[in-house]
Amino acid sequence: MNPSLHSEDAIDEGLLWPATQHSAQQREAKRQAVLSAAAQLFNERGFHATSLDDIAARLGVSKPTLYYYVKNKEEILLGCVRQGLQLMLDGIEASRRDGGTALDQLTACMQVYARIVTQDFGMCLIRVGEEQISAPNRAELRRIKAEIDHEFRRLVAQGVEEGSLAPCDPKMTAFVIGGALSWIGRWYQPGGEYSPQEVAGHCLKTLLAGVLRR
Amino acid sequence: MNPSLHSEDAIDEGLLWPATQHSAQQREAKRQAVLSAAAQLFNERGFHATSLDDIAARLGVSKPTLYYYVKNKEEILLGCVRQGLQLMLDGIEASRRDGGTALDQLTACMQVYARIVTQDFGMCLIRVGEEQISAPNRAELRRIKAEIDHEFRRLVAQGVEEGSLAPCDPKMTAFVIGGALSWIGRWYQPGGEYSPQEVAGHCLKTLLAGVLRR
């Protein structure tokens, strides 16, 4: 049996994609669909309670088909978490390009972060603990997380310098901001009482202005 | 073989407790030691990467001994999470008894919460996802979590009423406060750069006063 042909046939049977000749781009799009379905399931049931059979079933394809796109469950999780992190890096980069004061940029980054953790890959990044990922890959993920954290610290420090933010320990302030926003991903239920925009709005307001009456 | 005697002998071999006659109190103290060791391991390695053998090894006892105190790993996790929640309920109750304004009580509850999530059981409550726990037990844990959440909401609403807190949506404000404080448990490394008191102090200051310059 030709595994590549088998897989292509099987995944096309799933009616997810039209039956056309193979290309790297198409393969990547299908791999992407595998990651999306997996992220949803990990978020709903947890990483350990989700099997490759569950992922295949959600996509309407056979399990051998999945192996054409991914090696195993850890690779899938790693792909999901990488995507969540990449979305954040892209959002931060876009905020930086948009320019403005440090406070403008910090606010934009907070909005990006709050939005992404309500989406499949970002939620997966928050909900699934690092201990599911093996050491070398974990180091890579930590490096990216540190990059995001440093960007928040840099903006907080710059905000203090420009006078828009109160004097503080930028490391701890970035941590409080990141923590409160990350927690959205642990708690948020799509389709619940609040829209992602409402949650982000309330969180940003509370974090920026604080709780005490002025 | 008498499993109870076997277990008692084995756990005494571990030199954790003096060899004395059995009592319910002693049994509970030993069960407590099992939970403590387990919480530390779950926090260090994750729930799934920790085996009953690991827990037994950390206590210096044999695995059959553990079965005298706990049925399985889920029961251990449930015990750890229940303790984390009970510590919070006790702390909240103590803050209430101490009285003062709603802001005083809210601040005291925040301090309690921040402290507990840097300790073994509280950290376990934060780090281990609910999906490791089966449905009926999960419902019980959610009920207790909701109780804690409602206490924060009640204090926020009362703080707005007494004029110490800015007008807000108490549900969302309680969520931001709880989220930022919970995140400490995901990130905090005992023996790291900041003491639990420093972390709590910075978080409370940032959450109460906000980030913007007044």
Image (cartoon, coloured by chain):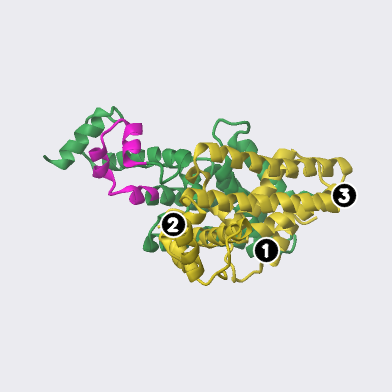
Chain colours: A green, B yellow
Q: Position of residue A156 (x, y in %)?
A: 65, 60
Question: Where does the magenta region start and end?
Answer: A51-77
Q: Residue at x 39, y 63 (%)?
A: A135
**Which kind of residue does numbered mark 1 sit on?**
Val
- Identify the residue position indicated by label 1 in the image: B199
- Identify the residue position indicated by label 3 in the image: B101
Q: Position of residue A162 (x, y in %)?
A: 71, 61
With A176 as the anchor, is B12 left or right in this view?
left
Q: Foreground residue, B172 or A23?
A: B172
Which quarter of the figure is the C terminus of chain B placed in? Answer: bottom right
**Which kind of residue does numbered mark 3 sit on?**
Thr
- Identify the residue position indicated by label 2 in the image: B2
Which image quadrant is residue A32 in?
top left
Calculate the distance from the C-alpha at mark 1 to the C-alpha at mark 3.
24 Å
Q: Is residue A53 visible?
A: yes
With A121 as the anchor, is A183 left or right in this view?
right
Q: Position of residue A197 (x, y in %)?
A: 61, 37
- The answer to whether marks 2 and 1 sit on the same chain is yes
**Which kind of residue does numbered mark 2 sit on?**
Asn
Q: Position of residue A30 (x, y in %)?
A: 30, 38
Calculate the distance from the C-alpha at mark 3 to the C-alpha at mark 2.
57 Å
Residue furthest left in the image? A1
